Amino acid sequence: MDLLQWLFDARIDFAGGQFLLLREVLGNVFGLLSALGGMRRRVWAWPIGIAGNLLLLTVFLGTVFGSPNSVDLLGQAGRQVMFIATAVYGWVRWNQARHEGGTAVEPRWASWGTRALLVVVLVGGTAALTPLFRMLGSYEPVWADAWIFMGSLLATFGMAKGWVEFWLIWVAVDIVGVPLLLSAGYYASAFMYVFYGAFTLTGFFVWWRVRSRQDAEEARVTVETAHLDPTVRQD
């Protein structure tokens, strides 16, 4: 209990009365480790991410948990709950894939129809949640909080499905998230969002290369099979 109380109270103080909550720093570090594990397609990325989500949930509900920073970001808090639920799904899915085929996930491109649906859901969900978050007292600009929530939901689901495009959704989240978090005084999270932006772009190109290698290997196998199969016509 003493350790838990220390964790809730611990802060890093700076000159001029500025401070960072240790929970915010640790939550973002766990989030970064989870992103690294996701880029490397490791199953442990999911439980590490859940631990970070639990810490950040207590941070963004400042008035509920009595944090020194009493600004509530309901979209940020709500997405931690969503992360946990989606992470359980991803954890189970990647575990099943690993036991069946030896690899947690095989990156693949989403179809054009799926891409269009993702854009519609992102924009439509943001528009629908903005008045709800505003009514609940979320920090302005509320649309940014709603955008972060919807983008995070779609990106996490995309990661569980193995879509390469999920990295680009994270980039869209980071672009909006940095100025929002800075204005709300969550400096550690804002800094991590800047870092995440560069990291998610790297992850996108890593998964892209993996998918390209798989496509090349599948094409090679198809050609070799056609060459060895006498029933296949060769003009």
Image (cartoon, rainbow, N blue to C red):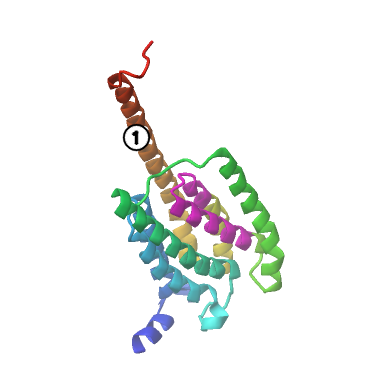
- Residue interval drawn in magenta: 144-171
Asked whether 168 falls inside the magenta stretch, the response is yes
Quarter of the figure with the N terminus: bottom left
- Which image quarter: residue 219? top left
User: Horizontal and vertical percent for residue 167?
Assistant: 47, 48
Is residue 21 visible in this depiction of the protein? no
Question: Between residues 28 and 16, which one lies in front from this camera angle?
Answer: 28
**Residue that lies at the very extreme toward the bottom in this rendered image:** 2
Report the residue at 36% width, 13% height from top.
234
Image location (x, y in percent) of residue 46: 38, 62
**Where does the image place residue 25, in percent across and percent down from the top left?**
41, 69
Instruction: Judge from the rendering whether residue 234 lies leftward or rightward of residue 159; answer left or right.
Output: left
- Residue that appears at 40% across and 57% down: 93
Relative depth, front residue between 200 and 183: 200
Image point 59% across, 41% down: which residue? 113
- How far across and how far down the image is residue 60, in percent? 53, 72
For label 1, the residue is 213
**35 vs 12: above or below:** above
The correct choice, above or below, for 166 with respect to 24 in the image is: above
Depth check, front residue: 148 or 154: 154
Whether residue 111 is visible, yes or no, is yes
Q: Quadrant of the C terminus?
A: top left
Residue type for callout 1: Arg
Judge left or right: residue 225 versus residue 150: left
The residue most toward the top is: 235
